[in-house]
Structure formats: structure tokens, C-alpha cells
Amino acid sequence: MAKMSDVAELAGVSTATVSRVLRSPEAVKEATQKKVYDAIRQLDYQPNMLARNLRINKTGTLLVVAPDLNNLVFSEMIAGIDEEAGKCGYQVLLGNTHGDAKKIEGYIDQLKQKQVDGLILLSVELDEKVWQDITDHYPIVIASDYVEAIQVPTISIDNVACGKQITNHFIQMGHSKIGFIGGRLQASVSRDRLNGYKQALVEAKIAIQDLWIEQGDYSILSGYNLCLKMMNGPNTPTAIFCGSDEMAFGAIKALREKGYRVPEDVAVAGFDDIKFAAVMNPALTTIAQPLQKMGQKAMEVLYQLINGQVPVQKQYIIECEFKIRESCGYHLK
Amino acid sequence: MAKMSDVAELAGVSTATVSRVLRSPEAVKEATQKKVYDAIRQLDYQPNMLARNLRINKTGTLLVVAPDLNNLVFSEMIAGIDEEAGKCGYQVLLGNTHGDAKKIEGYIDQLKQKQVDGLILLSVELDEKVWQDITDHYPIVIASDYVEAIQVPTISIDNVACGKQITNHFIQMGHSKIGFIGGRLQASVSRDRLNGYKQALVEAKIAIQDLWIEQGDYSILSGYNLCLKMMNGPNTPTAIFCGSDEMAFGAIKALREKGYRVPEDVAVAGFDDIKFAAVMNPALTTIAQPLQKMGQKAMEVLYQLINGQVPVQKQYIIECEFKIRESCGYHLK
DNA sequence: CCTTTAAATGTAATCGATTACATTTATAGG
DNA sequence: CCTATAAATGTAATCGATTACATTTAAAGG
């Protein structure tokens, strides 16, 4: 593969000029530019990015760390990030933790090793210690999840409010026996949704039943299993709020198999509004997270960070939309 | 950030020795290794990958080009690639074409520019010309899709056979009015599934009805729309074979809205077996593609290519599994 | 204790671009 | 036509590691 010096030689100029033609053409005479471009074409020259990157000490790459690529919540955010990254001239490197928090540390090393210019974390379950040495030194943004008391810009939604909204919706429809199938409480997202649920109950003076609160892992299967468990006792809820659409799908399947009609016998709501929510039978009532937008925003903020700017806000809260469909039974009233 | 020369100085050795401690420790005395590691720890030294990569002319990165991250077919393959890549010490860079074939050329440039060591294409709609200059020179693997008459290793399934299998299943259940909603024929995958469908009909001496053959884009919406269109005439099919699960979901929704029962009035089958297929109501009959495995295999072959080995086969065909569930109506008989 | 050979370490070139600074060339003004 | 200034180009250092080759140190054998 031809290198810059070959081009320079063929064009009868120095490498400095070739470099300038590529990087700041306004500083080079037209005629020279033409000569250089001819040489480039003739040799089918492509600049070696490894060399360029070393020299300018940038990679033009960012790393997105997610726990599961096959979860539409994450893939949609990644798509948003990728789109915005393209606009900023950046590339996206994938980091899949498969739920293993320790892997994040390895990814942080990549930052230090100059393999990437910045990092977007889509989930954080990480030791405080690890945060200490990186917080200020490197461009990092957290999206969706967040960590209290840490100085990292965050893009998220108001999970407490959303959890409350869904629960209130059930309450307003006359439900008082409302179950909750959420995610692991290590994640702030899960805690907040649960808290929203509890707040709504407390405000409505409905007692909180620990039997009706379960922790899954956001998967279809965990929704299925936990719903079966919840519906097994003598006293069962008439409405179930699931922390993700996938868990709601699993729950609905479990209910169907146990002979319950949804929403007539048990109402169900999900969270996320993935593309399959509307197509389900019954169509799923859920909270639409603007995932693509969150991804874009995260990239936007990261770009500022990379360029040494200080983001206006530490925390960006994006608005959600409550999608009332069939699974909550609202249309029957 | 400390660099290697700092470590060398602190440890009282040369950079060559530091480098050796990191790359080929067996060539360095134990005592020296300890000194070096102490210095590394003291300085919190991290090697600059940009420099290393330039020197050894490798990036340790591969690029995966997919048309849509939010399509589970692709995200599952990517997850498979990512998993295997991790084992090989490689990183995955994302390339999202959003269906724009021209973008692929840009990604190929990245190969030439040494930004990545290899390329895995999850869909190919590309000019023959572009192929000419890259085929032999760079490590490239195609997964899922393929291109005839091109010398690139390919991982795929037997789409003709699978298309035939589903169609035959309908025929065996007594259907003779069978519709097909596939993808755009630019993709070999779509052509093959359609051909399988046609072959099955021809062999069963059933006339092919052009009205019952539609081309979508593998999305829920296109399945929905094309199904509405197909069911609009006076003469409508009693079974519909969709080229993807997503389109099948859309089709089922359309049928439900038009008052048809699935599978009693119209039987439906999908393709892919994404994780939502089993949870749908009715549960979707479909072909399970071993997507994760295909991704892994693709990475395996790419790794061979990168290391200058010649893969044993030019084309790897992975076995699929036919998942008979409810939407085809088989359980009713 | 000296020589031979192997093990350990050091020296310095190298990967391929970028860019500050120096130098040459062109343009304008008198 | 000469000088002052601006525009264009060239020279060479630099980014931070790796590694062939040279040199020093240690081990083995007599």
C-alpha cells in the first residue's frame, strides 16, 4: 500500500504539502493540489489512520458499553448514538458486558490506552473506587442508568415519575391489588421505578404488599416465571406493572396459560415501548422511552466533553410518553 | 499520562526491556520484571495502543456492517461475533448502513486505511466493481447474505430449503392458496426464500399466483401493509409465509384487524425465530436461524483470514430448525 | 581463573503521518 | 526594477511504542 511519501515523490512535492492538501487545502495552491490528487489517484493512496491517530492523539472512536445487545432498549440507544456519532465524525466501538460489571473496568482501560476518545455507559454497576480515578480525567457519559454522587453527565428519564404514572393509572381504574415485577435493585433505574410504584400506592393509601413485588432481569423468561409465582398464592393482584415490555410479554404469556384473560381478569402494563409492544395481542400499555433521542443526546454531550467543553447540565432528563393501549383494560371502560 | 520511557527510567532499564516485559516476558529476568512492574504500578502506566498499533500494523479491531441494529436478526449475529471476537482478542466496531448500500464503500475504505483488520458484512447490496479491488486483498467475510461469483467466504443457511420446508408444511396441511411476503429481491436471502416457496408449489403442482407474492422490507409495518393488500382482493390465500418474524407479526395484526382468526381462518408462518416469536399470541411457527452461531463462525473464519490462513471452505451452511407452534394451525389438526 | 556460549539488556531505526518553523516564491507598491 | 509582504512549500522533529542487531552479563566447562 502506497504511503504519503510515495505520493509526495510522484507529485514532486514534500509530504508536508501532501498532508496539507488532505487536511487544510486552503493553504495549498490549486495547481499543486491537482498534482497531489493525481498522484493520490494514480497510487490509490489511502492515509494510514494508525499513523495519523498517533500523531494527533485521537482515535475518532468512542466505546459504548451495554449489558445486552439483543435488548431493544439498548440497541435503540446504540442506534441513536451511532447516528449522532456519524454526524460528529466518530465511530462506535461495541462493548458488551453480558451483565458482568467487572468488564466495565476493562473498557475503561481502553480509554486510558487511547484506544477510544470517550465512553458511553448504558448501565452502571460499578465500584465507587473505580470511579475515583476516572471521573475527571476522561470523557464519559452515562445514559439511561445513573450513579448518585458521581460527577458524570447523565442522560435519563424520570423513572420515579413514570413508575408512579403507570401505577396511578391502575389505581384510577379502580385497582388496589397491584403487583410489580421490576429489575435488580442494583440498577438505579429499577429502584426508581419501584419507588414510583410505592409512592403512588402510599399516596392512594394502599398498603404495600411485599408478596406482590418481584425482581427479575428484564427478560421475557423472568417476567413469565415471576408472574407465575405471583399468581400462585391465594391472594393475587388484579393488575401487574412490569418494569420492561419484555417482562410484560412474559407475564401475559403466564397469565394466559393460567387461564386469566388480559386485561379482563388481570391488567398488565410494561415499560419501554419497544416496537413489538403495539403489535402484541393485547396491545401493550407502556411508557415510551425516547431511546434513540437519548442516545443522540448522550453522544452530543460526549462530543462536548471530548472537545474540552463543559456540558451545560450535569443531568439531562428526557420526557417520556405514556402509551395507553389494550393490556391495561382502559379501552373497556 | 506516563509513557514507556518514564517507566524505563524509573525502573532503571531501557524501553526495550519494558516492552519485552509486556510482550515477551520469558526473555526477561525475573528480578528485572519485578522492577518494571513496580514502576508500571507506581506510574499507573498504560501502553498507548495507538503507538503499538502503528508499529505492529494491526488494530485488533474488526468492523461489522449491518443495515439495522434494531433488527434482532442482526443484533443476535453481532452478539455472536462480539463474543467470539472477545475470545480472539478482537474488538468490534459498528457500521450501520441504514439500508444505504453506498455506505459499505466507506466502510471498506476503513479497511484500507488500517482502521480495522477485517470486515464482516451482514448484508450485501454492492456493485461488482467495488468487489474487484478488495476481494483478494483484505480479510472479509459475509454472513447471512451472500454474493454469487465472488470469492468471499460466506456463512449462511440454506434459504431455499427453508422456504421450501415452510411452504411444504402448509401444503401438507391441505393449503393450496399460499401467500408469500418476502424481502427485496436485491438480497440473495430474499430471492432464495422466494425460490424455495416457488419450488414447493411447482413440485406440488400448485399454480403460482403473482398476486400472492409481495416484497416488503422485513419490518412489522411492511408485513402489516402487504398483508392488508393481499387480503383485499376477492381471492385471498388461506396461508401466508412471511420472510421474517417481524413481517409475520405485522401480518397477524392485519389479519386480526380484518376479522380473520389466526390460524383458523388464515395460517401464518414467519422466519428467524426471534425471541418474541414463542411469546406471541398465537405463538409463531417459524424457522430458527442459529444467528449467534453464525456470528461466531463468521468471526472464526475472519480470524483465519486475518492470520493469513485459507479457510477450509468457501461457503459454510449452518443448519436451521423448523419450529412448529400455533400460528400455522398444526396443533389444531 | 579463563574461555565459550547462552541469557539479558541496551541502542537506535522504524512504523506513517502531522506541524512548527524555516525557506523559497509570488505579488504589490513605489 | 527593487523591496516589503504575503503566500506557498520544504525541513525535520515528533507522537510512543516495537524489534533487529549489538553489546554486556551470567553460566558452564575445563
Image: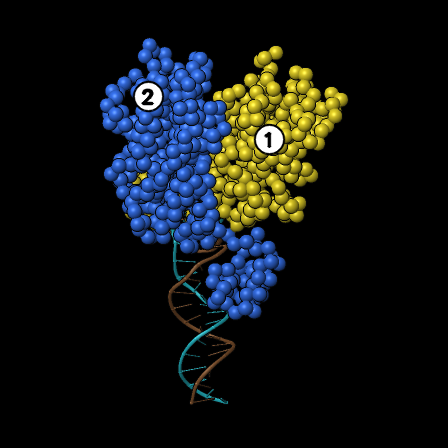
Chain colours: A blue, B yellow, C brown, D cyan
Quarter of the image where one finds residue A128: top left
- Is residue A165 toward the left or the right of residue B169 in the image? left
Distance, label 1 to label 2, CA atoms, is 37 Å
Q: Quadrant of residue A246?
A: top left
Observer-nearest of B240 and B291: B240
Residue at the image point whose x is 30% and y is 27% from the top: A197
Q: Dot 2, crowdedness within 10 Å: few (<14), some or many (≥20)?
A: some
Seen from the viewer's position, the closer of residues C13 and A256 is: A256
Write the residue at 70% across / 23% down. B200
Q: Circle 1 is placed at which residue position?
A: B228
Q: Position of residue A94 (x, y in %)?
A: 44, 38
Tag 1 subunit: B
Q: Is residue B136 visible?
A: no
Identify residue type, mark 1. Answer: Leu
Q: Is residue C12 above or below residue A135?
A: below
* Up-down relation of residue B154 to residue A236 (above or below): below
Left or right of residue A184: residue B212: right
Q: Are marks 1 and 2 in contact (CB under 8 Å)?
A: no
Numbered tag placed on residue A175 in the rendering: 2
Q: Chain of mark 2?
A: A
Q: Are marks 1 and 2 on the same chain?
A: no
Q: Position of residue B191 (x, y in %)?
A: 66, 33
Query: Residue visible at 59% across and 44% down?
Result: B101
Q: Amino acid at mark 2?
A: His
Displayed quadrant of residue B232: top right
Q: Residue at x 56, y 23 (%)?
A: B259
